[in-house]
């Protein structure tokens, strides 16, 4: 499946998931070491040297595929449609548009359509989550202070 921003979603078959799980487990055991991968393609061998960060990413991808989850790699600078952004926030598209109109996060217009950078969306999501946790902590402290038994 192809996303609107051009990224492809990879959905593993059961066989793919099993192989990914096994490969991911083996690679994860090598994290933190100097790792050299050998690739065998149609009878010839080629050696690859991956930067440690790429190996970490590969282990995470294999772990998700091994669990049977679909995976898409999206750079933080990617721009999302309002529907994609709303889906990531688990809100309706009209609610997201209202948030954009209120200036809750930056966006830009392409013709009549809005685009939101993934990095801005994730920052908004983290900020909102932090505020929720603060409010819950405050409620818990207040209920303790009032002896409400919580």
Image: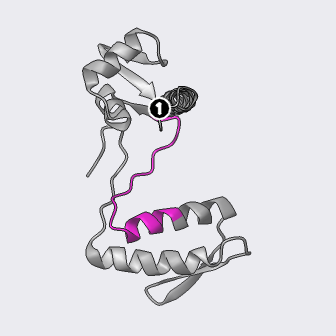
Identify the main secondary structure in magenta.
Answer: loop
Judged left or right of residue 52, residue 121 is: left
Is there any visible trace of residue 51 in the rendered image? Answer: no
**Residue 77 is covered by the magenta coloring:** yes
Q: Is residue 33 above or below residue 107?
A: below
- Residue neighbourhood size for the residue with mark 1, other residues' Cα within 10 Å, grouped as few (<14), some (14–19), many (≥20): few
Task: Residue 133 in the image: state x and y as whole percent.
Answer: 53, 33
Which residue lies under the disc numbered 1?
Answer: 148
Q: Give me the residue at 43% from left, 86% from top.
A: 42
Q: Nearer the viewer, residue 33 or 112?
A: 33
Is there any visible trace of residue 24 in the rendered image? Answer: yes
Q: Is residue 122 above or below residue 44?
A: above
Task: Residue 50 in the image: state x and y as whole percent.
Answer: 64, 67
Q: Nearer the viewer, residue 126 or 70?
A: 126
Q: Is residue 100 above or below residue 116?
A: above
Q: Give me the residue at 47% from left, 90% from top.
A: 43
Residue segment shown in magenta:
60-78
């Amino acid at each position: 499946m192809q996303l609107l921003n051009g990224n492809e979603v990879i959905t593993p078959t059961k066989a793919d998931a099993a192989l990914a799980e096994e490969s991911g487990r083996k690679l994860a055991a090598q994290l933190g070491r100097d790792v050299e991968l050998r690739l065998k393609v149609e009878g010839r061998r080629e050696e690859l040297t991956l930067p440690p960060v790429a190996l970490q990413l590969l282990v995470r991808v294999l772990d998700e595929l091994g669990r049977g989850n679909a995976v898409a790699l999206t750079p933080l600078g990617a721009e999302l449609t309002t529907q994609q952004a709303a889906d990531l926030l688990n809100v309706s598209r009209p609610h997201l548009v209202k948030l954009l109109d209120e200036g809750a996060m930056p966006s830009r217009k392409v013709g009549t359509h809005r685009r939101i950078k993934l990095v801005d969306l994730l920052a908004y999501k983290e900020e909102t989550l932090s505020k929720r946790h603060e409010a819950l902590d405050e409620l818990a402290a207040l209920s303790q202070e009032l002896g409400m038994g919580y």
